[in-house]
Amino acid sequence: MHTVQVALADRSYPIYIGDGLLAHGKLLAQHLPQNRVALITDTTVAALYLDKVAEALGAACVSVTKVVVPTGERHKDWHNLNAVFETLLANHCERKTTLVALGGGVIGDLAGFAAATYLRGVPYIQLPTTLLAQVDSSVGGKTAINHPRGKNMIGAFYQPLAVIADTATLKTLPDRELSAGLAEVIKYGLIRDPAFFAWLESNIDALIGREPAALAYAISRSCENKAEVVAADEREESGTRALLNLGHTFGHAIETGLGYGTWLHGEAVAAGTVMAARLSQHLGLIGAPEVARVAALLERARLPVNAPDLGVERYLQLMGMDKKVEGGRMRFILLRAIGSALLTAEVSRDALAAVLATPVAHA
Ligand code: NAD
Ligand code: GLY
């Protein structure tokens, strides 16, 4: 087992990464303020892992209330948040009852937001079961639900007590979901870790082939990067954490524009990352060889590199909802090299329209 620490003073916590960790109930139980949890998951993950986790916790003398919501991005909404609250209230879950999110980023975000608001805030623990959740969404305390007008529009910064990433769960993950997670892995290389980007170029086939050692390294290195960024800028105030949003302004527009769940989050981020690279090239920050390098790695990870054709005006409307908008101005994460990014509002409408209008796939 490898442990990465997220250093946030009194809100610091460990990320445990290892094979078979879900079977070790005591690893989770040691973090509980009360020997009681509400285990929140989706229907797909419930069929695979809910009983196993509940049994492991039972063996560690923890009582479990099970909460199962429908699978999928379009269910990360008020309706299912309220369904979670209904079950917690009906079962008299208390202020020291810990919510445990078992699943991908949808469950992590939904359960995390439930924890931030139920009884004005209860503890929670993340058990991420997708690559995307193990490398990104379970770490850092961003919790949210979607609004029909925009992704992750309603939420809170609220840190978990611990993250337990069992890499064995990736064995059941569909190929498309594995690739979606790789989009966020590649992101860390692009924004701040050129050596990691080069390692990914050499090892992308091993990752697609699910070689355990390659996956374990990619997850650990991603979590180390994320933990450093979150420790430097927990609430996205200085601009450091915003860099984790490379490709996301475009990506969130794709997800909302097509309807939640049509493209996976990681797929939308991949195409959005190429758009961000092309915008960086348009502004003279990087050259065509760098853009080609970005697109080549994403393609080798079996991710889309051409965005759907939503129309320039619709893109601009959707991107205007971005949480980074400040004083009415959109702000973008751009690349100034492979491994170095910046946040800027200095992007003309013409440059943006040029990127949004040039070759894209049909939705
Ligand atoms: P997801 O939670 O929908 O999981 C993807 C699919 O895989 C689902 O169908 C799920 O049921 C299934 N699944 C999960 N684990 C499995 C397993 N081990 N075996 C088989 N199937 C499994 O999606 P995701 O890609 O994990 O997360 C995307 C979400 O994360 C988006 O809502 C995005 O906005 C959010 N996100 C949040 C942050 C953050 O910092 N909070 C960061 C990145 C992404
Ligand atoms: N996934 C972006 C962030 O955590 O800030």
Image (cartoon, rainbow, N blue to C red):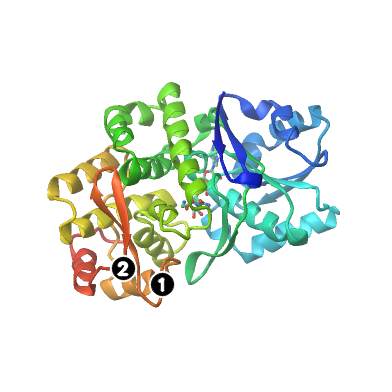
Q: Nearer the viewer, residue 177 or 37?
A: 37
Question: Is residue 306 visible to the viewer in this orientation of the structure?
Answer: no
Question: Is residue 351 visible to the viewer in this orientation of the structure?
Answer: yes
Q: Report the residue at 48% width, 58% height from top.
A: 236
Q: Report the residue at 60% width, 50% height from top.
A: 107
Residue 281 drawn above or below residue 294: below
Indicate if the residue with disc 2 has its beta carbon within 8 Å of ligand 2. no
The picture places residue 213, in percent across and down from the top left corner, at 43, 22
Residue 208 drawn above or below residue 261: above
Horizontally, residue 141 falls left or right of residue 95, namely: left
Q: Nearer the viewer, residue 101 or 239?
A: 239
**Secondary structure found at label 1:** loop
Q: Earlier in the sequence, mark 1 or mark 2?
A: 1
Crowding at dot 2, Cα within 10 Å, few <14 / some 14-19 / many 20+, comes out as few
Q: Report the residue at 44% width, 64% height from top.
A: 259
Using the rendered view, name the quadrant where residue 307 is placed: bottom left
On the image, numbered disc 2 is attached to which residue?
345
Question: What's the residue type where badge 1 is placed?
Answer: Glu
Horizontally, residue 43 falls left or right of residue 26, namely: left
On the image, numbered disc 1 is attached to which residue?
326
Question: What's the residue type where badge 2 is placed?
Answer: Ala
Q: Are marks 1 and 2 in contact (CB under 8 Å)?
A: yes
Horizontally, residue 308 falls left or right of residue 21, namely: left
The picture places residue 182, in percent across and down from the top left corner, at 39, 40
The picture places residue 256, in percent across and down from the top left corner, at 43, 65
